[in-house]
Amino acid sequence: MFLASLVFLLLGFTISIVFSRNKTLETNSRYGPSSYPFIGCLISFYANRRRLLQWYTDLLSLSPSQTISLRRLGSRRTVVTANPDNVEYILKTNFINFPKGKPFTDLLGDLLGGGIFNSDADQWSSQRKVASHEFTTRSIRDFGFEVLRDEAENRLIPVLESAAYAGATLDLQEVLKRFAFDVVCKFSLGTDPDCLDLTRPVSPLVVAFDTAAEISARRAMEPIYAVWKIKRWLNVGSERRLREAVRTVHVSVSEIIRAKKKSLEIGTGDEAKQDLLSRFLSAGHGGDAVRDMVISFIMAGRDTTSAAMTWLFWLLTQNDVAEKKVLEEVGSLMKGKDGDLGLGFEDLKVMSYTKACLCEAMRLYPPVAWDSKHAANDDVLPDGTRVSRGDKVTYFPYGMGRMEKLWGKDWDEFKPDRWLACEPEDGARPVLRSVSPFKFPVFQAGPRVCLGKETAFMQMKYVIGSVLRRFEIVPVCNNRPIFVPLLTAHMASGFKVKIKRRTTQ
């Protein structure tokens, strides 16, 4: 750590001397950051390293094509785009030319290995076929819904009930992360970590996941790309902590897989569980490939849904009209029902306004702020941007949600109605507007579109509806939360709230 920091400081000192003597070396780009020979935009990148999202967004908003390119010392040229035509070209039209690429898979390789979210070509294709088959079966859908309902009604709701009764302050973000981890572990592994028992310490597996995900994400934010590789080679600092966390994750998941194999071997076919791991193993898949695939599903299923729900709960506390409409939608579905049974699967299908709220929340605060590919060959994007082989090409959901060209002058307002085809007549259910996934790529699009998209919406709608019809969420602090983009985004310092029981449901 010390050696890497010293190298970087010496480099920065040298650069400052050079440019204090020769300002004429700067070449200005009207629609990109200031760039210099040899070091490129390193100075601007370093100055904005703690606000990269806003920096990129500001630059993109000034670009006529909503695309910019950056070069900096130690890193390949990066093209960043918020142009839907470019996004469609990258994710669908010329999908084959834009794999994740080795520079990207290296960043996450220690944690995710060769899992479906961190692989390309035949390795990705084979895993995609296996996972796609399982996700499209009715039995896995029904199993997923039962897991969701059990966890929500028997754990999440009682936790919130206890907080309401005691008048306690709760970190709703942390509670939702625990809830989502329980759900995804039951669904993917068939094991129950029981994270919503708040009297117990946090599971070492959860801590290890968080540590590994954060450090892996921060690799990409190093001003000089080689720094994290040097630290990994020396096994110091954050890279040493990452290695220890990954070992914990791999050992824990491998132990679960061994136990699952044993239970399947001694059981009958009728006793086989419905979780994804059991299905993969029963189909003859095994080894590190299954471990890596399951880790990828846990990572994606836990953090993305909890992040989206956290931001929506906060947004609804700031928008009484939208909250009232969600309550009206849920109330109309619960009429004449036993409230203890909760929402049914068919109810979730028609919760259009709640889904509009979720889409609007993810437009403003996408669970994955950006995603990158690497050009396999020279290419030209639809807006005329030339891409060279090896260039990193990043599409940017966070910035896309803030482009006036895409969403109008009111882009910064929370307006779920922008997702509705028209204002519904009295008594009629709203109809969702068809929006291009390349304008709103929070679930990716094209061949790599998220397999769990519908499962995620099912989970989020159930939780939002079930919680709001019972409780009022009251933020403890009125300050605007800070959006932190790592592998998946979250609120800095959590979402501290008071829970109040609604007098009417």
Image (tube, helix red, strand yellow):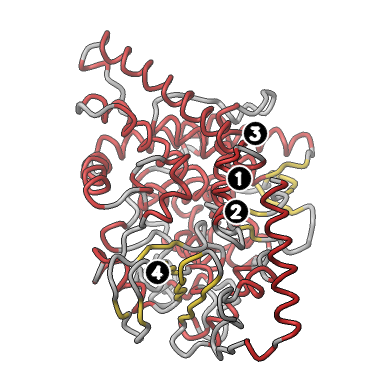
Mark 1 burial class by Cα count in 10 Å: few <14, some 14-19, many 20+ = some
State yes or no: discs 1 and 4 in contact (Cβ < 8 Å). no
- Residue 171 image-quadrant placement: top right
Q: Nearer the viewer, residue 136 or 4?
A: 4
Mark 4 burial class by Cα count in 10 Å: few <14, some 14-19, many 20+ = many
Judged from this view, the residue extending furthest toward the top is: 266
Q: Which residue is mark 2?
A: 227
Q: Amino acid at mark 3?
A: Val
**What percent of the width, then of the height, locates residue 153?**
52, 34
**Residue at mark 4 to residue at mark 2: CA–CA distance:** 20 Å
Considering only order in the chain, which callout, 4 or 1, is on the residue closer to the N terminus?
Answer: 1
**Residue at mark 1 to residue at mark 4: CA–CA distance:** 24 Å
Considering only order in the chain, which callout, 2 or 3, is on the residue closer to the N terminus?
Answer: 3
Marking on residue 391: 4
Marking on residue 159: 3
Q: Amino acid at mark 2?
A: Val
Considering only order in the chain, which callout, 3 or 4, is on the residue closer to the N terminus?
Answer: 3
Q: Which residue is mark 1?
A: 231
**Position above or below: 390 against 200:** below
Considering only order in the chain, which callout, 3 or 1, is on the residue closer to the N terminus?
Answer: 3
Left or right relative to 487: residue 265: left
State yes or no: discs 3 and 2 in contact (Cβ < 8 Å). no
**Residue at mark 4 to residue at mark 3: CA–CA distance:** 48 Å
